[in-house]
Image (spheres, grey):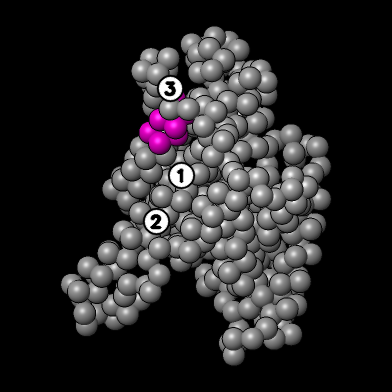
Amino acid sequence: MSTAPLTAAPSDGSFTRGQVNGVLFVALFAAAVTRIAAIPAIAGLGLSPLIVGIVAGAIYGNVLRDGMPASWAAGVNFSARKLLRIAVAFFGLRVSLQEIAQVGLPGLAESVLIVVSTLVIGTWAGMKIMKLDRDTALLTAAGSAICGAAAVLAFESTLQSKPHKSAMAVGSVVLFGTLSMFLYPVLFNAGWLHLDTVGAGLFFGGTIHEVAQVVGAASNVSPEATHIATIVKMTRVMLLVPVLLVVGVWVNRSARREAAANPASPGSQSNAPRKLAIPWFALGFLGFVVINSLHVLPETATSTLNTLDTFALTMAMTALGIETRISQIRQAGPRALTTGLILYVWLVAGGLGITWAVQHLFG
């Protein structure tokens, strides 16, 4: 099995027929994935179309990829890169400043503490303990810390990492996020979490990976807990912007240091700082949050754009899956999953501690 990711065919910068066909192929694939994700048995597991898309794409990319014309690779690459950035920017329409204000300082403190601590612990544990490369460690940490697969996509775009690294991070989100969705309500209803309804909302929203998984878990507690958990979760999504800005600057500085330390090395060219250290799509995300907060768009328009955005994100995930090679995942898969496990233990134990502290300080 080849270990090389799918690469785009040479292009003069304009859409060739092959590129268009590639985009259309991914779109049709994503449409099928969307229908599959809507099947009650799959939807009930909290598996969003994004997650189903990368799994289905990876299966196709490793089993049936020879059936796709090579000229379509440019369209697949476009979906996994440029379309991805656009879709992440429009993801901001799902968040409003008014919603974040509803949970006030407790929700903001919960989100900031969880996101920062999980990113730091995940990156450190992945690189130092599990000996993962920087990108895989960061992607795994981001998926656990912020908003699951959407965060992995955003970080993948900023880091310009290999598709199989995103696939490993998404695998962690699927496994531990799904586990949380079923385990948290059981622990709460058994009285083992020692949290009231507000605390359950803070804890569920602050520590579960995907938005759908948060809603699925909290709905087993109460409508109030679901409301609080959803807002806290979207506050974590909002933190995607400052985190991406910091990561962009950090990656740029690291590249500068490597280039300065090894000016004549063969890899110095690839380590050179990028022109755009600040991801523009993160600023676009923030802009759409402001637009959504000002209510300048009709509710029907916002709903339609969110539906189209979910489809675009599904296309991006499907394209990443097609570019993923199982043999590459196998090399670091157990270490990446172990990093995800370390983060999961932190989210449960550390998340409970943070929730209790936040309630004590602001309650």
Q: Which mark is residue 339?
A: none
Is label 1 in a helix, a strand or a loop? loop
* Amino acid at the residue labelled 1: Leu
Under mark 3, the amino acid is Thr
* Number of numbered discs visible in the structure rendering: 3
Q: How would you classify the magenta stretch by its main secondary structure?
A: helix
Q: Which residues are magenta?
A: 106-113
- Between the C-alphas of marks 3 and 1, the distance is 18 Å
Which amino acid, by three-letter code, is at mark 2?
Answer: Leu
> In this image, 331 relative to 256: left or right?
right
Between the C-alphas of marks 1 and 2, the distance is 10 Å
Task: Please determine whether, in this image, residue 111 is positioned above or below residue 36.
Answer: above
Give the labeled residue for mark 1.
239
Q: Residue furthest bottom?
A: 12
- The residue where tag 2 is placed is 245
Q: Which of marks 2 and 1 precedes in the sequence?
A: 1
Which residue has dot 3 on it? 355
Q: Secondary structure at mark 2?
A: helix
Rendered-image quadrant of the N terminus: bottom right
- Label whose residue precedes the other's in the sequence (3 or 1): 1
Q: CA distance from mark 2 to mark 3?
A: 27 Å
> Residue 207: horizontal and vertical position, in percent?
49, 32
Mark 3: secondary structure: helix
Contact, mark 2 vs mark 3 (Cβ under 8 Å)? no
